[in-house]
Every structure is written in structure tokens, then in C-alpha cells.
Image (spheres, rainbow, N blue to C red):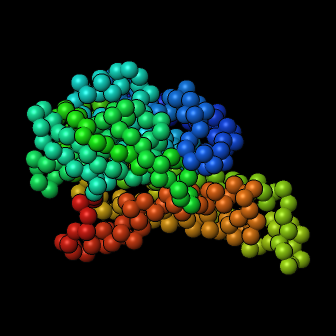
Amino acid sequence: MSTDHAARDAAARAKLLRGARAILPLLRQNAERCERERRIADENIAMMQDAGLFRILVPSDYGGHEAGLRTYTDVVAEISRGCGATGWVAFISDATDWLVAQYPDEVLAEVYGPSPDTRIIGLFDGANARTTRTDGGFILNGQWGFGSGSHHAQWVAASAPLSDRPGDEGVLLVPTSKVSIKDTWYVAGMRGTGSDTVVATDVFVPDRHVFPWALGLTGQNRHHGSRTYYGASFVPILAHMLIAPLLGLAQAALELTIERLNRGKRVSYTFYLDSRQAVVTQMQVAEAATCINAAFLLMRDWADRIDAAALASQDFDYTTRAQIRNDIGYAVRLCRNAVDLLLNAQGASSFADSNPLQRIWRDLETASRHAILNPDICQEIYGKALLGVEERITPLV
């Protein structure tokens, strides 16, 4: 990584982390409210906007921080320490900013010209969408579930098959004023993300608002002048972005557990009046902390490597990209294992409605089931690559 880029990125990271830490108490205070209302509290959105947390990956030409993946990872994990649902919506918006930076400058001016705090959500499962070619663009129809952050977004970036390119999908940018939201988000975890269904009916999308997935999957995404972070390997960076909320949730679970144990808790049906004195509790907390530290170290290392490769205009070979998917899946296992251990350390009281740990557990268990994060699929991809098995089970490597 060049000295100039490293210095600018470190300065942005320090500033953004200060902003995220300053709002942590209010994020924690509002977490139950977000879950109850099934959407992020307006106050949370306003606080994050004031702290510049929606600008992490917005190009600097449009008022953004144009930061690297390492900065993104640390900041979104920090937000998620306060509220997992809010961290997830921050991930969606910031990750989609990176994708939108692949579009031409005239489109970026449309999107970010009114404000660098413009929020965009990504809807990347186009199975229930279709397009019809028309003069100057496409007519878009479809429904996309899991529209996290849809209630606070100004644009959506929605996947759909391109009718004039058999077998190819595109990402189509549409203002939220042209779509509707269907109330469908009734779930066990990540309730606060407002991940309702987005519906488009006969929406015209001009050609300049269409980015074919094939360009990214074949490494032809734009380096966009000096914005060299935007030349990162397409799938590795987008897959890596998913892990940040899980890292923050796991860290929050550890901090909460230590805090509660330090207030005093006996081990029922034993002679331990203070569970901190129980060897089993000590081992559970130590192993959980080790899992979380290992997950952070692994993901920060890959973030640094992905950033460095982008700045050097280099791509990863297939086996390395498969390893990135594998290690992301392994970090998921580490986070899950850590929270399981902490549930055991707190015991049955972990599941009281008054204990935030049960919400953290539900949020992490739900978020970690995102298809891209599936540890078994990630491991199979890497195992096939290591053994030279040519069969591919996904194009997303």
C-alpha cells in the first residue's frame, strides 16, 4: 500500500472510529426499540449521518472518505457493537457505495451530487425480477426480499436478468421514489433491519444506470481514475464486507458477559457463589475471547491484503480467492462458537428478555445464515481449489 493512501486511510479510520464510539451508548439504548419497531430508529440514522458513517466508501470527488476495506471493517464492526441491526444496515449501504463507484461519473453525480450521505441498498437476488429491453434502457419489474435499510434509502441497486443478454444479470440503479415496500419482515433475528420486500412495477431504467455483473465477475470493474480502492477483486471484497457486523456482535457479547459476571452471579446447584471463580467459566470466557480475536485478526489481515492488491492493480488467482471465501466462512464459525460459549457462561439467564445477549445471539445466528457466509459452502469451494477439482459450485469466487 502506498504511503499516501495508507496515511489518508489511517486518518479516515481514526476519525470514523471516534464518531462510531461516540454514538455507541445511544445505539445500545435504541437497540431494543429498533427490534420492536422492525426498522432502524430515525435517531440512529441521523447520528450515523452526522458522524459521516454513510460516507466510508463514497468517492472523495463526491464528498466521501474513499476509505479502504480495513477501515470499513473496523468501523462497521464498531457500529455493530452498539446495535447489530444498525451495523447490518450500515454494511448494506456502505458496501453498495463501493459497487456504485463502478458506474460512470455522470451516474455518480446523479447519486451523490445532492449529498454524499445518500443511502443506497443492494438487492442482489434477482430470481423474482425481469427486464424488457426498450429504447435507451430497460423496463424493470420484480420483487426483492431482504431489503435491509429500505425505509431509509434514497436509491436501490437491484439485480435482474438482462433481457438482451441471455444468462447475464445486471445491477440496475433505481430511486426509491419509483418503488414500493411490502411489509414482510417478521423474523427471529435482525428484526431491526427493516428488511422488507421491495417491489418495482414497470420502472424505466436508463442504460447508464445498468452495471452488468459479468464485468465485475471477470475483473473488468472500473479503477475509476485515482480511486484505486475501487479496483479491488470484485467477489472477495463484497463477500468480506458481510463479516463486519458479525465481528461487532461477537465483541459486544463478550463485553456484555464480562460486565454481567463482574456484577456477581452464582453457579446454580454448585458451591460457587461467584461464577468468576469457577474454572469452567474462566475457560469459556477465555476461549470465546480467543475465537473473537482470531476472527478479527484473520479478517483484518485479508482486508489489508485486498486493499494492497487493489492499490497495486493486482487481482488474486482462483485458489487465493477461494481461500478468502473459506476464511470468511471460518470467521463465521469462530463468531458463532464464541457466542455459544458466552451463552453457557451466563447460563439460562442469557435468554431472559431483559438480557441483551439473547438479542445479540438471535441477530448473529440470523445474519450468519446469509448464503455467501455459509461456512460449509465456503470450505467446499476452497477444498476443491486445493485439490484441483474443476467442478465449480458458484460463480462467486
Q: Nearer the viewer, residue 212 or 269?
A: 212
* Rendered view: 108 above or below 330: above
Left or right of 358 in this view: 335: left
Q: Residue at x 26, y 28 (%)?
A: 107
Q: Residue at x 39, y 53 (%)?
A: 145
Would you say residue 231 is visible in this rendering? no
Q: Residue furthest bottom?
A: 269
* Rendered view: 179 above or below 362: above
Return the x and y of residue 88 as percentages of the image width and height: 50, 47
* Rendered view: 51 above or below 139: above
Q: Residue at x 10, y 33 (%)?
A: 135
Q: Residue at x 35, y 38 (%)?
A: 179
Q: Nearer the viewer, residue 226 or 273?
A: 273
Return the x and y of residue 168 as percentages of the image width and height: 16, 52
Q: Quadrant of residue 175?
A: top left
Q: Quadrant of residue 226?
A: top left
How many labels were placed on the picture? Answer: 0
Return the x and y of residue 330 as percentages of the image width and height: 45, 65
Return the x and y of residue 388 as percentages of the image width and height: 21, 73
Q: Nearer the viewer, residue 347 or 352?
A: 352
Q: Quadrant of the N terminus?
A: top left
Would you say residue 321 is visible in this rendering? yes
* Rendered view: 15 above or below 292: above
Left or right of 332 in this view: 233: left
Left or right of 180 in this view: 263: right
